[in-house]
């Protein structure tokens, strides 16, 4: 399939209905229906799109897609490719093999990309997060990891998150800084790990760049250990964005509490895109 020409930097749209969101899926992903429904409930057009629709000649013409048919891309939760090798590793390798150039251009031009749970794992494997280099949206190899939970088991529980971002992340601008929200987690590999010996360097970079978005807290709003921090993430990090603020990954699931706190994540990115509508 021929690559469609790039449409340009967040070009003006005629209406909210012109905002188009792709929720990418392969075998093993889930939550795509809930994520699509969340966006559609806000009046924008969203669909679940299989990765093969971007490159396979076996797909019918009317079902073929280009990344630039959309203004926002979401990697949903689940267990893509059965989480073999590492969670998100196979999905990310397939994306890099067929969409790397397009995805880098998409991110560089300011279009938002969201990764939820397994989607966060995919973004880490892609090298899109922590995303310190604005001119190089995807690194050649992962620069951090989401390791096995310190409890060594699957954790499925509500979590309290403190919003730490000062406004850079386009997915949380409707959430005031310091507000505590509740999103549930459901994962076995979500522990944020930085390269050994460089933990302080990475943390300082994230803090200086306003890239830390959510941190796990207890019922008093204090940073605490297990079970409040369900996976043992360094610095209680639950979500982060890239240095540009348009790539956001988090382990908890906002789409599962859309009619409560989760709605704010989707409203934030729709508001960001609607400025061009």
Image: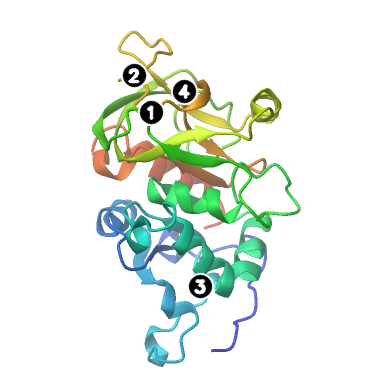
**58 left or right of 219?**
right
Find disc 2 in the rendering and name its residue.
226
Residue 173 is at least partly visible in this image: no
Q: CA distance from mark 3 to mark 2?
A: 42 Å
Q: Position of residue 39 (x, y in %)?
A: 34, 54
Crowd rating for badge 1 (residues with CA inside 10 Å; few <14, some 14–19, many 20+): some
Please name which of the two marks, 3 or 2, marks the residue nearer to the observer: 2
Find disc 3 in the rendering and name its residue.
69
**Is disc 4 in contact with disc 2, using a CB cutoff of under 8 Å?**
no
Which is nearer the eye, 180 or 15? 180
Q: Position of residue 240 (x, y in %)?
A: 53, 36
Q: CA distance from mark 4 to mark 2?
A: 10 Å
Residue at the (37%, 54%) spot, across then down: 76
**183 left or right of 53?**
left
Residue at the (25%, 42%) spot, across then down: 256
Find disc 1 in the rendering and name its residue.
150
Residue 76 is at least partly visible in this image: yes
Disc 2 is placed on an element classified as loop
Crowd rating for badge 3 (residues with CA inside 10 Å; few <14, some 14–19, many 20+): some
Name the N-terminal-most of marks 4 and 2. 2
Residue at the (67%, 68%) spot, across then down: 8
Q: CA distance from mark 1 to mark 3?
A: 40 Å
**Is disc 2 in contact with disc 1, using a CB cutoff of under 8 Å?**
yes
Find disc 4 in the rendering and name its residue.
236
Disc 3 is placed on an element classified as helix
């Amino acid at each position: 399939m021929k690559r469609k020409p790039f449409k340009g930097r967040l070009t003006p749209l005629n209406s909210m209905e012109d905002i188009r969101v792709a929720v990418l899926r392969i075998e093993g992903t889930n939550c795509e229906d809930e994520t699509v429904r969340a966006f559609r409930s806000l009046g924008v057009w969203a669909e679940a799109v299989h990765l093969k629709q971007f490159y396979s000649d076996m797909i019918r013409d009317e079902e073929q897609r280009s990344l630039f048919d959309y203004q926002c891309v979401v990697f949903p939760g689940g267990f893509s490719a059965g989480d073999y090798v590492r969670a998100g590793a196979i999905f990310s390798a397939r994306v890099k093999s067929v969409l790397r150039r397009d995805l880098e251009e998409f991110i560089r031009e300011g279009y938002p990309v969201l990764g939820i749970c397994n989607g966060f794992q995919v973004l880490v494997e892609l090298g899109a997060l922590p995303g310190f280099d604005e001119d190089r949206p995807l690194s050649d190899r992962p620069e951090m990891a989401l390791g096995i939970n310190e409890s060594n088991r699957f954790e499925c529980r509500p979590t309290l998150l403190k919003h730490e971002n000062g406004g850079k992340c386009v997915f949380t601008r409707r959430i005031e800084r310091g507000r505590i929200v509740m999103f549930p987690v459901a994962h076995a590999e979500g522990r944020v790990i930085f390269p050994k010996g460089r933990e302080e360097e990475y943390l300082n970079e994230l803090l200086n760049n306003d890239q830390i978005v959510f941190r796990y807290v207890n019922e008093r709003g204090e940073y605490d250990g297990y079970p409040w921090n369900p996976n043992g993430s360094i610095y209680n990090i639950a979500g982060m964005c890239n240095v540009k603020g348009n790539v956001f990954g988090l382990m908890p699931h906002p789409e599962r509490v859309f009619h409560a706190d989760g709605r704010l994540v989707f409203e934030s990115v729709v508001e960001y895109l609607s400025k061009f509508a």
